Amino acid sequence: YGGVSPQPPPAASTWMMVHIITWNVGSAMPPDDVTSLLGLNVGDGNTDMYIIGLQEVNSMINKRLKDVLFTDQWSEVCMDALSPFGYVLVTSQRMQGMLLLVFAKYFHLPFLRGIQTQTTRTGLGGIWGNKGGVSARMNMFGHSICFLNCHLPAHMENSDQRMEDFESILQQQQFEGQAATGVMDHDVVFWFGDLNFRIEDLDMQVVKSAIDNNKLSTLWEKDQLNMAKGSETVLEGFHEGPLKFPPTYKFDVGTDTYDTSGKKRKPAWTDRILWRSRPMAQHFYRSHMEYTISDHKPVSSIFTLQFPYRVDMPLVTLFVEDEWTEISDAVAKYKAAPNFPRSSWDWIGLYKVGFKHHKDYVGYVWAKQEESDFLRQEHQVRANHTSI
């Protein structure tokens, strides 16, 4: 993302509010309304980024063929909900049923750089992508940040395998160029997903009684992930807020009732959000009981990060002097930073207010640079009938 029209001069540092959501959607179609899940009904508009990690998105062959042109239905629902509020899809990554979406306010785009994604399969010994991790990394105002969405092995007895798979994902996910090489090399790491950790030792009735009587803290010490935090070196430095919401798995679909099937799965906090970084404020950590399309409940959290500016200037700044009333008015000037690596593939896009993603342009024009232009600081492009 090169640039947008100039913003007011920044302060010495910026506060970024990041809203993270994880949900195992159980192959369900998206609900008609995700407003409350995204907090759009109560938010003050100060959220800077939305990070949405989904697991078990419908990955049937015929469904994927329909999705291959650009997006799936879950991406469309999220874009439709967020774009009217000025959020743009920065990047996405899908691996079978796993999906990671990164949205940001449009005016942050020039300061999100070095964007890369990775996938790691751990299902069936590493050949199947029903389990594993998908990630996105970027530099934000010059600070490196990585978002890792995981779906780890199921069942009570597989706690060690979950930790092994997490370590394998961290080892295999390597990024290119001058970016932080691995996930853990970033300044800030968010790890979330259906991590599938269970509650050990306690029987079904004890667990349900603790939930019914709002004595959730009595279950915390038997939670497998909490137990692993004290012994697994790979978890050093990871933090998590208190689990003050009821276990998010397993529910009868369409209800708030824990599993009544023959399997009678014991409730568990399978769906989690952790972070590893500098101190930051976590504003809430909650589940969303109102969504009943899956046997899991979605979980969300909002964080505030403070970034001292390492990068506070766009690589490209665009100037548009007047409103355009006809094609002949369609002139834009731009100035590139000295360290901006120009390419013959550079282009400038024209977008409607509320655009959804970088391909959602009305038109574009190539920003070609002639040899005689190399020393010029400011350049001009003009759109025409064929480019709009």
Image (cartoon, grey):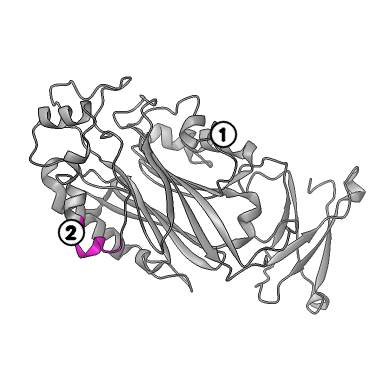
Inspect the magenta stretch and tell me whether residue 235 lies in it: yes
Q: Is residue 252 left or right of residue 79?
A: left
- Can you give x and y, in whole percent of width and height, for residue 223 in the image? 18, 45
**Region rendered in magenta:** 229-237
Q: Which corner quadrant of the image does residue 292 belong to? A: top left
Looking at the rendered structure, the kind of residue marked 2 is Gly
Q: Secondary structure at mark 1?
A: helix
Is residue 265 something one can see in this rendering?
A: no
**Side of 62 relative to 127 (left or right):** right
Viewer-side residue, 326 vs 194: 194
Can you say whether 385 is above or below 43 in the image? Answer: below
Q: Residue at x 24, y 31 (%)?
A: 214
Secondary element type, mark 2: loop
Give the residue drawn at x 43%, y 57%.
Answer: 280
Q: Amino acid at mark 1?
A: Ala
321 w.r.t. 379: above or below:
above
Disc 1 marks which residue? 81
Horizontal side of 295 relative to 227 (left or right) equals right
> How far from the left and from the top, in percent, is residue 257?
25, 21
Q: Residue at x 52, y 36 (%)?
A: 78
Q: Which residue is mark 2?
A: 230
What is the count of numbered marks? 2
